[in-house]
Image (tube, helix red, strand yellow):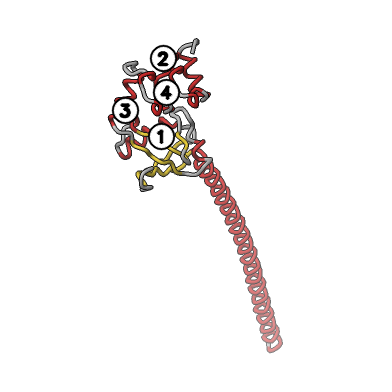
Amino acid sequence: RNAIAAAAAIADKDAMAAHAAATAAEALVREQAGEAAARRAAKAEAERAAQEGARREEARARWATKAKEADQRWKVLRVRSAVDGREVCAIPAGRTWRVEQLKAAIEAAEGTPAKQQRLLRDGHLLKDDEEVRAVWAHGEEVALVRIDDSWLSFLDDVGDGLVSLGDLDEELRGDREVVLTAVRGRGLELRHASSIVRADREVVIEAVRCDGDA
């Protein structure tokens, strides 16, 4: 009986040892599986973060391109008084705008009728049909000269033929704006202009356009 009991005890110990070994092996497998899962999760997270970073970088590049394109299409032009240099208004102007559109925007912003505006860039009078991009090439400012009503009324009379260049003094016959106003309605008025203005290509073109004999 003692031998049987001893054998049973040994068998129990062996079973317990086997169970402990199996438990340890199972724990090791679980630990290794957990580590593998953690590595897979870390890898997946790194890949997700990399993809997110790439998407953000692509979005930043896309918006930078759009901002650059927008900057090329639009620019804020500062309008200053030609008298005292005071800023009158700031106009977001389109690259494809013409000066007449800029004048309309100035009228809407600060009230001076477009007809009474004369815009200068570096002392050069801007024509209504010029593109605003020509202004951008020389900076982001234009000077505004406000024309009084009496001068506008006089130009209207010249344009309507109520006043002839031949009736004006030498100074006015040498005024480019006055002569242009006259020849746009009556090309032959060019003959009364001063020699300097008669040599102006644009003035001559306007006169001939109105009257081929000019």
Q: Pointer 1 and pointer 2: residues touching (CB < 8 Å)?
A: no
Residue 107 location (% of width, % of height): 33, 35
In terms of secondary structure, where does tag 1 sit? helix
Q: Earlier in the sequence, mark 1 or mark 2?
A: 1
In this picture, is 202 found above or below 75?
Answer: above
Disc 1 vs disc 2: which is toward the camera? 2
Amino acid type assigned to the residue bearing label 3 in the image: Leu
Residue 209 location (% of width, % of height): 48, 15
Report the residue at 40% width, 16% height from top.
185
The residue where tag 3 is placed is 152
Amino acid type assigned to the residue bearing label 4 in the image: Val
User: Spatial distance from mark 4 to mark 2, Cα to Cα?
Assistant: 10 Å
Q: How many marks?
A: 4
Amino acid type assigned to the residue bearing label 2 in the image: Arg
Residue 115 location (% of width, % of height): 34, 29
Q: Residues within 10 Å of mark 1 (few under 14, many from 20)?
A: many
In terms of secondary structure, where does tag 4 sit? helix
Q: Quadrant of residue 9?
A: bottom right
Report the residue at 54% width, 47% height from top.
64
Residue 207 location (% of width, % of height): 47, 17
The residue where tag 4 is placed is 179
User: Spatial distance from mark 1 to mark 2, Cα to Cα?
Assistant: 29 Å
Left or right, 161 with reference to 20: left
Front position in the image: 210 or 34:
210
User: Spatial distance from mark 4 to mark 3, Cα to Cα?
Assistant: 14 Å
Left or right, 163 with reference to 176: left
Q: Residues within 10 Å of mark 3 (few under 14, many from 20)?
A: few
Circle on res. 102: 1
Amino acid type assigned to the residue bearing label 1 in the image: Leu
